[in-house]
Amino acid sequence: MKILVCINKTPDTTSKIAFKNNNTAFDDSGVQWIINPYDEWYSLVRAIELKEKDPSIIIHLVTVGSADCDPIIRKAFALGGDEGFRINIDSTDSSFIAAQIADLANKNQYDIVFTGKESIDYNSSAIGGIIAELIDAPYISLATLFELNGNTATITREIEGGEEVAEVSLPLVVSCQKGMAEQRIPNMRGIMAARTKPLNVIEPIAQENFTSIINFELPPAKAGVKLVAADNVAELIRLLHEEAKAF
Amino acid sequence: MSVLIFIEHSEGLIKKSAHEVLTYGAKLAAQLGTTAEGLVLGTVSENLTTLGKYGVTKINQINNESLNTIDSKLYAATIAEAVTLTGASVIIFSHTPTGKSIAARVSAKLKAGLVSGAAALPDTSNGFIVRKSVFSSKAFANISINTDIKVISVNPNSISAVIGNGEATLNQLTINVGSPSIKIIAVNKITGEIPLTEADIVVSGGRGLKGPENWGVLLDLAKALGAATACSRPVGDAHWRPHHEHVGQTGVQVAPNLYIALGISGAIQHLAGVNRSKIMVVINKDPEAPFFKSADYGIVGDLFEIVPQMTAEIKRIKGIA
């Protein structure tokens, strides 16, 4: 059985968000890059757990981006995974990125493709669904539990106002969120092993960018908090009712 | 080149988020000088022609039992057929758990550019540019869709439903619907609660409440406001409240009109899940709590004294005994 885990490089959650070149590009000076938390904590760790149960499982990692993504793959290797692929091009278009991954998936015929539920930079939650369509596989989004029984997966997913449990035959694509697994810290053995795991750099397939970012904007600065004295609760409620018209 | 709006429903009833996207689609159609139509998959008990009040001229329905299983693969194939039949060039979804997974697949099927999580109506004065929130709501990006067919999923609560007098015609589409690729074996819905992502008002509690036994003050306030209840990550992790109430970067992301945070310090990961809220109110005894920097209104003080007074005052204004 072969599992593909899609990982993405994102700014650390506490990064200051700023833009450069007339607000057309993200300003990455001083930014600490991490593996997108949903990709690392939930997809990758769940894949590793499945391999721990069944050591015959092979885990491949893939990311789409230029050479500055290599440290992210090495970091993921320290947690687990057997072989990595970096598709050598930068893009912010979900369709473009997913098409690159789908091409790899079609070539290598994975049984399971895991993605995070969204990336914490562009927050589109789109990659998994597009890959699934391009490889003609079922897609379960927002999975919180994933169990494997031979060729069938039993997956719990979030729906509005609750959850549902689905049974799906492999191959399939799953987007993962909290509940799937718990965050792990790499151990020394993993860090040593990560250095020698094969990381293949492959060139992108021809594909258009269906969208392009024109520019970025920061939200308007908050006017500042209006503090009300603790002995004047009625005034807070009056402000919420009459000034903010919030209820 | 009409606008086609995917209408979500649950247990036979049209969802509130669908009312919002109907309005969004109708306004966009007016902007483009075209018409807006709705698309309903599966069976609903509401009279669909009344959805004309949101500004759509026609509701297309594919009433097939297979569609009662929400399978993104089957839905994408069916919706793509409907797009061809109706000649739509912009397809609108709600950015809900269901809507966003289907929107992505539909965009791939139609080779259409996708903006997922739109925050406003597109700017069509020069091209087709959609604003969406990025970096966990810490910024916006203006994104140009460069394909002829365009797919947009719209963040809940980013536009208010506008009600007029129109009535829509109902059109049953004949499409050969396949079978679902997944089998649903259980559904657990939380009954009697307002879904967090659809709520206008959210009351949320953190470690400042000190323990699950103290949640009564929060629940009373939520009840008086007709609000959904939420919690911070430590509260969810400690099982004081169910996991599905956890809002923040790794939990549910909400954007209500009013977010009231009780005893939550406002770590950056928490703010990432709530900072699209229109008005934020913070009650915290620590004046240094970072949440006060992002909030609109606040009281520094003991929530156990303040919250019951808030509840009483709200009940007085609303005339609730």
Image (cartoon, helix red, strand yellow):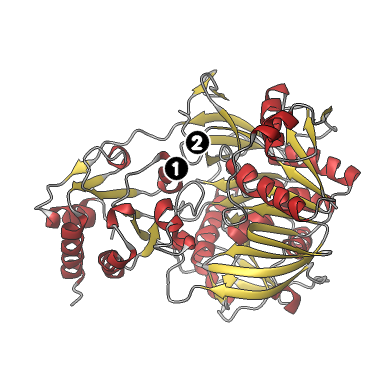
Circle 2: residue type: Thr
Q: Nearer the viewer, residue B277 or A185?
A: A185
Q: Disc 2 designates what residue?
A: A13
**What's the residue at 27%, 49% (across, down)?**
B282
Residue B130 appears in which quarter of the rendering?
Answer: top right
Query: Residue B94 location in percent, x, y?
Result: 57, 57
Q: Position of residue A22 (x, y in %)?
A: 52, 19
Amino acid type, residue under disc 1 in the picture: Gln
Counting other residues with Cα less than 10 Å from the Cα at mark 1, is it few (<14), some (14-19), or many (20 or more)? some
Q: Position of residue A232 (x, y in %)?
A: 10, 53
User: Quick one: quadrant of the C terminus of chain A?
Assistant: bottom left
Residue at 17 percent across and 49 percent down: it is: B301
Is residue A206 shown above or below A165?
above
The answer to whether one can see residue B109 in this image is: no
Dot 1: element = helix
Against B58, residue A42 (above or below) is above
State the residue position of label 1. Answer: B269
Front position in the image: B205 or A241: B205
Identify the disc placed on residue B306.
Answer: none
| Relative depth, front residue between B62 and B71 | B71
Is the Cβ of the residue at disc 1 closer than 8 Å to that at disc 2? yes
- The chain letter for the residue carrying disc 2 is A
Tell me if B220 is positioned left or right of B117 in this view: left
Q: CA distance from mark 1 to mark 2?
A: 7 Å
Query: In the picture provided, is B66 more to the left or to the right than B43?
Result: right
- Residue A77 appears in the figure: yes
Q: Quadrant of residue B293?
A: top left
Question: Left or right of B240: which side holds B220?
Answer: left
Instruction: Tell me what residue is drawn at x 58 percent, y 78 percent.
Output: B12
Name, please, the residue furthest toward the bottom.
B45
Disc 2 element: loop
